[in-house]
Amino acid sequence: MFKITIRGQIEEIDDKFYLACADGNKFKISSSQEYVQGDFLWEVVPSIDPEGVIQSLQMQSFSTEGEEECFMAGTVVQLRQKNSSVQLKIKRSLKKTLRLTLLSAPLETMKAGQTWWVSCIRQGKSLLISTAEQLETNQEPPRSLSELSPVAVEPKQTEKAAFLELEKKAIATLATQTNSAADSWRLKKPKIRENIIEWDAINTTTNGRARVQLNRETEETNIWSFNKTPKTANISEEDKRRLIVTPLGAARSIGASCFQIKIGPYEIVLDCGTRPKGYDPLPALDYLENPDLLLVSHSHQDHIGAVPVFQAIWPGTPIICTEGTREIARVMLRDCLKVQQREDFPELFDSDDLERTLFRMETAPVGVDIEPLPGLIVRFINAGHILGAACIYLRYRFASENETIEERSLLYTGDFHTASSRTTTGLMLKDLPQADMLIIESTYGAGTHPSRRTEETGLIEAIASVVKAGGNVLIPAFALGRAQEIILAIRTSALFH
Ligand SMILES: [Zn+2]
C-alpha cells in the first residue's frame, strides 16, 4: 500500500508545470499534460533526493475532498544519523520500485533490511515520519492507518526540520560573507548554548575553515574565518635555523606563563596567563613584536588569563588550543572577568574582548600534526594535568642550501601529570618526541610525593569522621581540576554509600 496526497493547484511557468501549495511551496511536475484547474487534493508519486527534499511529482489522480496524507511500506535501505533520515525501497505491484528518503526516522529502532510501515506528514518539501511500525517479513501491511500502533511523535521532529533550516541559513551566510559557493561548505556537529548555535565549517573546495554562530531568537549571524596568513619574507639561512626562547612570565615563579619562541621566520607565543593576586598581572607582552600565532596549553588562569588582552592587541593573530581547553576557557575567562569587576584587580579586558576571544579560538585535536603556518608543524600531546591540557610540540621544517629538509623543534610540556586522575588520563612518556629544546614545568618536581591513593583515603576518612560526628566540612580547593577530583573522590567512595 502506497499513498501520498498533496493539496494545491497547478501552475504553468515557461511551459513547465508546478503544483503550488497554500504554504508557498511549489513542486515541479515531471510529466507535462493538460491539468484541471483549481484547488484539489492530488495523489502523487514524488521523487525525493537523499537529503529528503522532494524534487518532483508524478501526478496520479485528484479529488476535491480530503486531507494530505502519506503512508507506505518499504524496506530500509539506508539510515543517516546526520539528518535523521531513512531511505525506503518501496515495491509496488506492476509499477516501478521507488526509493524515498523520509526525515525524522526513529533511528534507534530501525535497521537496514527490515520492512517498516510508516505514515508521514509533509513539512515544506520534506516528508517527516509521524508513525512507524516494523512488519514481519511477508506480513501484510495494515489496511488502514487506524490499525497502526503509532510510535510517539516527538515534538522534536519538527524541531529537527527547523534545525535543518537554520543550518541552511548558516551556510548561506558563510557563502555570502566569504564570497564562496554554498555547496562547498560542510558544517561540523553544532554546539548549542542556550539560543546560540555554533558550527565549525570547512570549505571542501578551498580547504578554508570558518566558524559560524547563529542566534536562534534574533537570527543574527556571526562569522570568523580561520585564514592562514603566510609570512613570505625572504629569510636568511641563519634565521631559518634560529630557535630563541624568551620567557615573558612564570620562569622561577607561578603565574603569567608566557613564552616567546622565535622559530624559523616565525614569532610564536606559548600560553598567555595572568598572575593570581592582581599585582602586576600580565606577562611582559611589550616584548612581543608581531606574533604569528598563540598556542594555549590549558585553561588554568595562569596560562590563559591574559589571552583576551593578547587578542585585543593582535586581533588577527590565530589562537589555537584543544577542544577541551576552549570549552573550559568559556567558564574560566568569564570567571576572571567577574573577579576583575568585583575585586581590587585592574580591569584587563571587557566582556566584548572576552566573547570575541572565545569565538575566534581555534581548536585542534590531540595527537595530530597540524600546519597552522607554512612549514610550522604543531602537535598537542595529552598532558594529564586537567581536562584538555596538552603539551605543545613545535617544529619548523625548511629546505637547506643543499636541498635537504632540516628541522628545528621544541617541546613545551605546560603543566603535566604522569598519573591518571578521575578526570584525565595521565601523560604517557612514550608520547613525547625528541626535540632540540625542552621547556618543562617543575612545580612540585623537587620532592617525592605520597601516593594519590594514600592521600585520598586519608582525606575521605577525615571527612567521614567529621560528618559522622554531626559536623560540616569545608574544603578549600582550586576551582578547576582539584575541586572536581575531590567531588568525584567523595562521590565514588564506599564510605558515603
Ligand atoms: Zn595548570
Image (cartoon, helix red, strand yellow):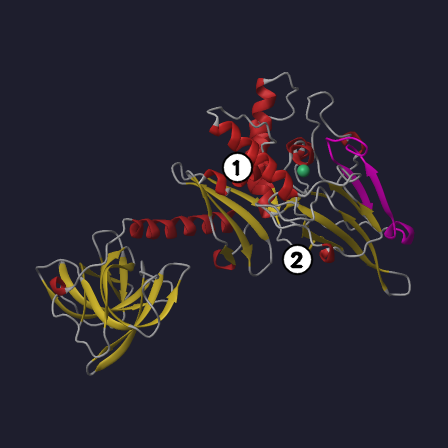
User: Looking at the rendered structure, which numbered label has been put on residue 368?
Assistant: 2
* Quarter of the image where the C terminus is located: top left
| Residue 188 marker | none
| Residue 377 visible to the viewer | yes
Residue 77 percent coordinates (x, y): 35, 73
Residue placed at 62% from the left, 44% from the top?
453
| Amino acid tagged 1 | Ile
Q: Residue 180: x, y in percent?
A: 53, 54
Q: Is residue 260 magenta?
A: yes
Q: Quadrant of ligand 1?
A: top right
Toward which corner of the image does residue 99 lie, by quadrant? bottom left
The magenta region covers 236-262
Residue indicated by mark 1: 487
Residue at x 55% of width, y 42% of height: 327
Quarter of the figure that contains the N terminus:
bottom left
Residue at the extreme left:
65
Say left or right for 318 vs 338.
right
Q: Nearer the viewer, residue 406 or 390?
A: 390
Residue placed at 52% from the left, 38% from the top?
490
Contact (Cβ within 8 Å) of mark 2 with mark 1: no
In-front residue for pair 275/31: 275
Gap between marks 2 and 1 measured at Cα: 32 Å
Report if residue 483 is visible in the image: no
Residue 255: in magenta span: yes
The amino acid sitting under disc 2 is Val
Q: Is mark 2 within 8 Å of ligand 1?
A: no
Within the image, what quadrant is residue 297 found in? top right
Helix, strand or loop under label 1: helix
Q: Residue 399 in the image: state x and y as whole percent.
A: 84, 61
Left or right: residue 193 versus residue 272 is left
In-image side of 142 versus 74 (left or right): left
Q: Position of residue 402 (x, y in %)?
A: 91, 65
